[in-house]
Amino acid sequence: MIRAGFMLLTKGSPRICLAGHIGVGHVFSHSGFVQDDSLGFLTVVNFVKELFGLDIKLVGTSVDGDSIKVFTSYGGVGIGKPRRGLTPFEISALRKAGGDPLFVQRLALEIFGRFYGNGISESAVSFMYALSESILDSLNRAIPESKLLKCEDEISSDIVWGVNIDFWGVPLAILATVNGSKIGLGPCEDLEGNVYKGVKFRVLRSLRALKIPTIVVESKAFNPALSVDVPSFLVRYNEEVDNSAVALSLVDSLKELGYPFLFISKAFPLLSKPAIEVESKKFVSRLLRLVKAFYRVKTSKSKVLILGELAKLISEDAGGVSFMSSRVNKVARAVGLMPGTGAVISMCLPKGYIKEHKIPFVTEDDLAKMTQVVRKAVIRLWDRIEDAQRELNLKFKALGG
């Protein structure tokens, strides 16, 4: 059933894009940053699900050898295969998986308790990948006019799905991306945001959606650099690089809805040296200090303590330096945002939340509110579309997009 207020866009080109991704297993980064990196993906899927009247449910989970298979409504199937296989206890837990499949990270937490990326928790991350893949497969089967492309690579197994619709008179391209690894590594996120690269470029080109103003929905995260008393929305862009019309449309929507939010207009600067290389240098210095210390010590206790610090460094801080290639980071910066094209909305968390939960997870209320915000923001952006497109055209070429 297609709900009132929109139809599939079969003629002409979209003029606004809504994009969101999941970085499968990208929970921790450097400096104490911790997130549920699925909020953007879930928002896009929920946006589409509600418009088309779809009911995406988790049909079941099975294990074939060391392969995890997840089945969702409309014939959706996703497969993950953890690099080091599965224990009988993991298999038993996976077969009991239940709940709303849209809450990918929460389901993984319910099964495994906690997990880390970078190959530390391969079974949990492979399950999340399989679940995410099955959701996009469901959408692709339920909406034949949509487009889906995959990277056939065990390490960077990205999937990009998109469709064009007319949303209350707004020609809109909707884009959902899975950045993840079938075998539970990474993730590599060179195709996050609206990066014009690989299968994401091909999907955007097929949707006729290149170089249009874009709302990018990101994660639910705790960032020690941001102080909030309650969970709040966060709108970020760089006024010299990104699209102020998109950012202001998001801010207007949040003001109208009365939700608490922060607004940062100097995020994501273009630097002569990619930010990820600066952080990588710091990471390597810490890594080398620990390796040298391990070489020098003689007692078991000292070795165990150093290995504990190494494990923490790899399972947490490494997430902030391994998620994106330097060449992509230099242009698209930390969230994969092409110059001139858009702005980013996410959620930020107070310190008390992370002290209690340790790892964030998206709730039904989070998802409902974020979906509501972006619906309004799309309409607001349409009211200033000429300004947004003019700004995009001026900045995109000038800033290396």
Image (tube, helix red, strand yellow):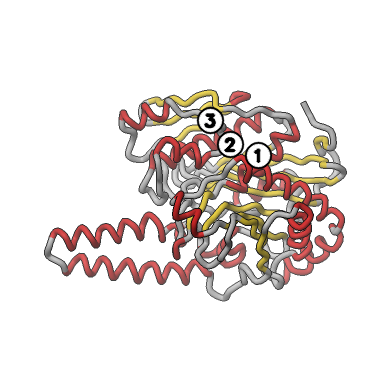
Q: CB under 8 Å between callouts 2 and 1?
A: yes
Please state, as top left, top right, bottom left or bottom right, where the C terminus lies in the image. bottom right
| Number of the front mark, 2 or 1 | 2
Circle 1 crowding by C-alpha within 10 Å: few under 14, some 14–19, many from 20: many
Check the image and report above or below for 216 versus 103: below
Between residues 3 and 362, which one lies in front from this camera angle?
362
Mark 2 secondary-structure assignment: loop
Residue position for label 2: 102
Q: Note whether residue 292 is visible.
A: yes
| Number of the front mark, 2 or 3 | 3
Residue position for label 3: 99
Circle 2 crowding by C-alpha within 10 Å: few under 14, some 14–19, many from 20: many
Between residues 376 and 243, which one lies in front from this camera angle?
376
Q: Residue at x 47, y 54 (%)?
A: 354
Tell me how far mark 2 sits from mark 3, CA to CA. 9 Å
Report which quarter residue 398 is drawn in. bottom right
Mark 3 secondary-structure assignment: loop
Q: Position of residue 290 (x, y in %)?
A: 27, 67
Tell me how far mark 2 sits from mark 1, CA to CA. 8 Å
Residue position for label 1: 45
